[in-house]
Amino acid sequence: MISKRGPASPAPMCPALSGARPGVFALLLALVGAGGVSGQSGEDAAEVGAVVEAVGTGLEAGDFAAHDTLLAAGPGVHIIEGAGVNHGWSDYRDHHLAPELEVFEDFSYRWFSIEPVVEGDAAWAAFRYELAADTPDGHVEVEGRGTIVLQRRDSRWRVVHLHTSGRRR
């Protein structure tokens, strides 16, 4: 657990998702329809699982530098929480994550039940998460699910899409 102190104002909410492009989901559907997980190797799945775990632990630790190498660069990367969306790692980091972590105290964020699937240079994983934090408005506990999409770029797995949705316990 880490403790963060900062201004008592809540983190800004991301605007509601509108006009979403179905490209990522069409790609996933095409890959599944074109062969499922037949091209998956144990080594690739382990690498993808390790990247997904690193993203989760890095978010909890507020390790922004690690995420500069884990997430693909550019605005084509989408990070969606519920119905809010950020375009690119820097947008998410600067306008959502950093302000949110500033008001969290006794913050814990755990990703588990990670199920990586690899097909060529594309990979995705479903996972579960638990979040707990003390905020200016009181203690919050959330349980949720997520989907993460990765692409192999320059021999490294990079996150190109992340979507989490949760509910308070």
Image (cartoon, grey):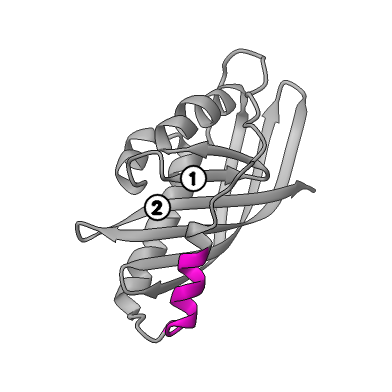
Q: Quadrant of the N terminus?
A: top right
For marks 1 and 2, give the CA distance. Answer: 9 Å
Boundaries of the magenta span: 26-37
Reading the image, the residue beneath label 1 is 78
The local crowd at label 1, few if under 14, some if 14 to 19, many if 20 or more residues have their Cα within 10 Å, is: many
Q: Is 28 rendered above or below residue 21?
A: below
Q: Nearer the viewer, mark 1 or mark 2?
A: 1
- At which x and y percent is residue 65? 32, 35
Question: Which quarter of the picture shows residue 50?
Answer: bottom left
Residue placed at 44% from the left, 56% from the top? 53
The label on residue 130 is none
Q: Quadrant of residue 118?
A: bottom left
Q: Which secondary structure lies at badge 1?
A: strand
Mark 2, Cα crowd under 10 Å, few <14 / some 14-19 / many 20+, is many
Q: Which mark is residue 159?
A: 2
**Residue 68 at x, y = what percent?**
32, 39
Q: Secondary structure at mark 2?
A: strand
